[in-house]
Amino acid sequence: MKKIFLVSFWVFPVSFVCSQESAPTASSSPRQIVSTTNPATAGDVEALRQQVQSLTETVKALQQQVKDQQAALEKANLTGESGLPENPEPSPIAGAEQSPTPSGSAAPRFPTEDMSVVSSTMAPTASPAPGASPNQLPGGFPTTDTSVVTSAPETISTTGAGASLTQPITIGGSKAYMNISLDSMFALAYSSAANLNDIEVGDHDPQQRGFNARNTELAFDGAVDPYFEGSANIVFLLDNDNETEVELEEAFLQTTSLPYNLQLKAGQFLADFGRLNPTHPHTWDFADTPLVNGLFLGPDGLRGVGAQASWTLPVPWYSQFVFASQNGRGESGFSFRNPGGNGVFFDRITTDREARGLQDFVWIPRFENSFNLSDTQTVLAGVSGAFGSNETGADSRTQIYGADLLYKWKSSHADAGFPFVKWQTEFMYRRYEAGHGANDSFPVAETFHDWGFYSQVLWGFKKGWSAGIRGDYVHMQDSMYTDDLDRQSRWRLTADLTWYPTEFSKIRLQYNQDFLKENFFLSAREVESVFLQWEFILGSHGAHKF
C-alpha cells in the first residue's frame, strides 16, 4: 500500500501533462457604449482647447530640456568635461532604469515559481504639482506629496504570493541600487515524538513541540556598479533554549556583463545542486526540508565559500552549464569535510584536517535545460553532482549524484499566477567511503551506497490559496558496525494548505507522518506531526533564480 501511494506521486503529474490540450480563447466583440450625458457647451469646448494648448506648451518645454541635456552631453564627450553639476543628486528613476542585469543567465520563457519573478515598470509621467517648478532637476528632493508619489517607479508583482511591491532603495550613482528586506518565519508544532529535533532533518525546520522561530532572514541585494552585483543573506534563529544563533547564509559577488553568456560568482553561496538546495526557506512549498536533502546535503544545505562559473548555451531553449568549487568544510559540507558533532561522524573519530590540495575541495557541476510544452506548460530538467573528500579516513571520498524534474502548468487566464499546478521531484544517490577514522581508531572501513527521493505536487486552486502533497523516501545501507540515527531508512507522507493574505504574508497548515524502518541497532517507529507556520516580509526582496 505504501509503495502504491508513492507511485501515485509520479502517475498523477504525468497524467495531468498528457491531459492538457491547448484550447482556443474565446474572443468577445466590444460592446457599444452609448453616451447618456448632455452635449458639450461652447464654454466647455473653449476650456478644453485651453487645456490642450497648455499641455502642448509643456511638452515643447520638456522637449527643449531634453535637447539642451543632449547638447551638454555631446559637448562633454567632445571636451572631456562634464556639462552637469559635479555632484548631482541621483535620480531614483534613472537608477532603476539603468541598473545592470546579469548577461550570463537567460531570462526564463515561463515563470517556474509563484514567488520567483519581479518586474519593474515605470510610473506614468505626471504634470508638475501645484507650487512645484516644472524645471526642477531630476533627482531633486521632492517637495510635495505628488512629487513623492511620482518620483520613482513601482515594482509590481506579476506572479502572486511572495513578490514585493516596494521599490529598491537607491544608493550612490544612477547605476547602483540596493534591495533590503526582512523575512521572518515562525511555527507552532506538535509531534507524537518528544524529540522532534531527531525527526526533522533541516536546521530551519520546527525542532520542538510548541513555538519555533527558526528563520529570520535579513537580505541585501543590488547592483554594485556596471560590472558586478552583490547579494547577502544573514539569518537569525532561536534554538530550543531560546538562544540566538546568527549565520552568514550567503554573501557573494557576481558579474553582469561578461561576453558569450558567461557569469562568474565568488563568495559564500548555496551550491547549485538540484532544485531545492539553492533556494531559501521562505520560497519553499512546505514547512520543512525533504528527507533526502537534509540527510545527504546537510541540515543547512550544501553551501560554503568558493567560486562558480556558469554558461548559458546559445540554443533556442534555456540551457545552462554550471561548475563550482567550495571548501566543503564544516556542517554546511555535511557529507564531505565535516568533523561531525563532538568530532564524530558515522561513529568514527574524524580527522578534521586542513586542505592538502585540490582533491579536498568539493567540486559541483550542474547541467539544466528548460523548454515550453505549450504556452501554458513548462518543463525544466537538470542533473547535478558533488565530489570531494570526507573526514572519516585519510583517503576517504564522497560522491553524490542528483537528477531533478520540474513541470508547471499555469492557466492562460491566470490572475496573479493562479490557478496553477506544479510537480517537482528530485532523486539522489550517495557513495560514502567511511574509513577507519583518525589514527585508525575504528575497526572496519565501509562503503555506504545510499539513495533517496522526494516528489511533490502543488495545486494553486484559487487566488492566494494552494494545497500540496509530498512523498519522501531514503534508503540507508544497513551496517553491523555503524550505530547512527542518520543511518536509519525512512519515508514520509506530507500534506499542506497555504493561504497568502497578501504578497507580504502567508499562513500554512501542514501534516507529516513519518515511518522509520528497523535496522541492526534501531527499532521501527511511526511519528505524526502537525505544523502551523506563519511568515511576513518587510521591504523589497530581490527576484529568485528561474
Image (cartoon, rainbow, N blue to C red):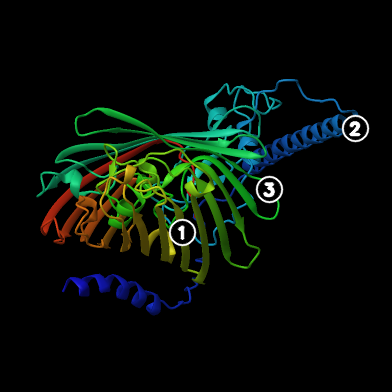
Determine whether label 3 and label 2 are within 8 Å by CB.
no
- Please report the residue visible at 24 percent of the width from the left and 33 percent of the height from the top: 239
Please give the residue where the numbered disc 3 appears in the rendered image. 258
Within 10 Å of disc 1 (Cα), the crowding (few <14, some 14-19, many 20+) is: many
Residue 375 position in % (x across, y down): 50, 69
Within 10 Å of disc 2 (Cα), the crowding (few <14, some 14-19, many 20+) is: few
Please report whichever mark, 1 or 2, sits nearer to the chain's N-terminal start: 2
Write down the quadrant of residue 521 in the picture. Answer: bottom left
Q: Nearer the viewer, residue 476 or 6?
A: 476
SS type, badge 2: helix
Residue 465 position in % (x across, y down): 30, 55
SS type, badge 3: loop
Q: Is residue 285 visible?
A: no
Q: Is residue 20 above or below residue 505?
A: below
Please give the residue where the numbered disc 2 appears in the rendered image. 78
Left or right for 445, reference 87: left
- At label 3, the amino acid type is Leu
- Please report the residue visible at 79 percent of the width from the left and 32 percent of the height from the top: 69
The numbered disc on residue 385 is 1
Left or right for 291, reference 423: left
Q: Is residue 124 visible?
A: yes
Q: Is residue 335 above or below residue 244?
A: below
Please report whichever mark, 3 or 2, sits nearer to the chain's N-terminal start: 2
Q: Is residue 508 above or below residue 467?
A: above
